[in-house]
Image (cartoon, rainbow, N blue to C red):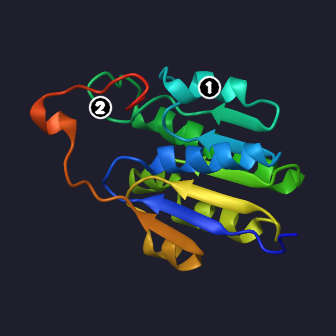
Amino acid sequence: MEKEGLTIVYTGKGKGKTTAALGLVLRAVGYGKKICMIQFIKGSWHYGEMYSSKRLEPEFEMVAIGKGFVGIIDDKSPKEDHARIAKEAIKICLEKIQTGKYDIIVLDEINYAINLGLVKVEDAINLIKSKPDKLDLILTGNYAREEIIDLADLVTEMKEIKHPFQRGIKARKGIDF
């Protein structure tokens, strides 16, 4: 029986941070573990994990709270709206952590939300420090802060070597989203 939950960080500028977290989720569902993923950025977009997460219920719950990617071409929301929703996401994370219902909680893109100034690093640190001993907590997103890395048990940095976008190949369903 596991005694100590881990804090895991998937970061870096390379592709695959959320994908790595979802791979861990798939493995954990296979053992009947209860998982919740809270998505800080991707909420209003349609992407594969929105649909596949339904197939993993009731073990896997996904809460997509963001308004979509911040500051890109089709983002028409003021930054204040993104920040307000990110604050709401922090409250939801704390509630989920405190329930004791989950074995694993994934805070998807929280590092990116911190980098954008939508989430205070202190709030993320508080989430890490408030987790029950048995809970595994996963934080994804590039630009992981040193304070978070210091608290983590496992940190993996994704490094881009080559990407199809460099050759003009656009994002593809099932591969990129």
Question: Is 8 rendered above or below residue 53?
Answer: below
Crowd tier of the residue under label 1, counting other residues whose Cα lies within 10 Å: few below 14, some 14–19, many 20 or above: few
Tell how many labels. 2
Distance from disc 2 to disc 1, alpha carbons, whole Å, reads 25 Å
At x 52%, y 79%, the residue is 150
Foreground pick, 54 / 92: 54
At x 80%, y 38%, the residue is 59
Label 2, secondary structure: give it.
loop
Place of residue 32 in the rendered image (x, y in percent of width and height, measured from the top left): 83, 45
Would you name the residue on which mark 2 appears?
72
Which labelled disc corresponds to residue 52?
A: 1
Residue 109 appears in the figure: no
Amino acid at dot 1: Ser
At x 60%, y 75%, the residue is 153
Place of residue 63 in the rendered image (x, y in percent of width and height, measured from the top left): 67, 34
Place of residue 44 in the rendered image (x, y in percent of width and height, measured from the top left): 51, 23
Q: Earlier in the sequence, mark 2 or mark 1?
A: 1
Foreground pick, 122 / 41: 41
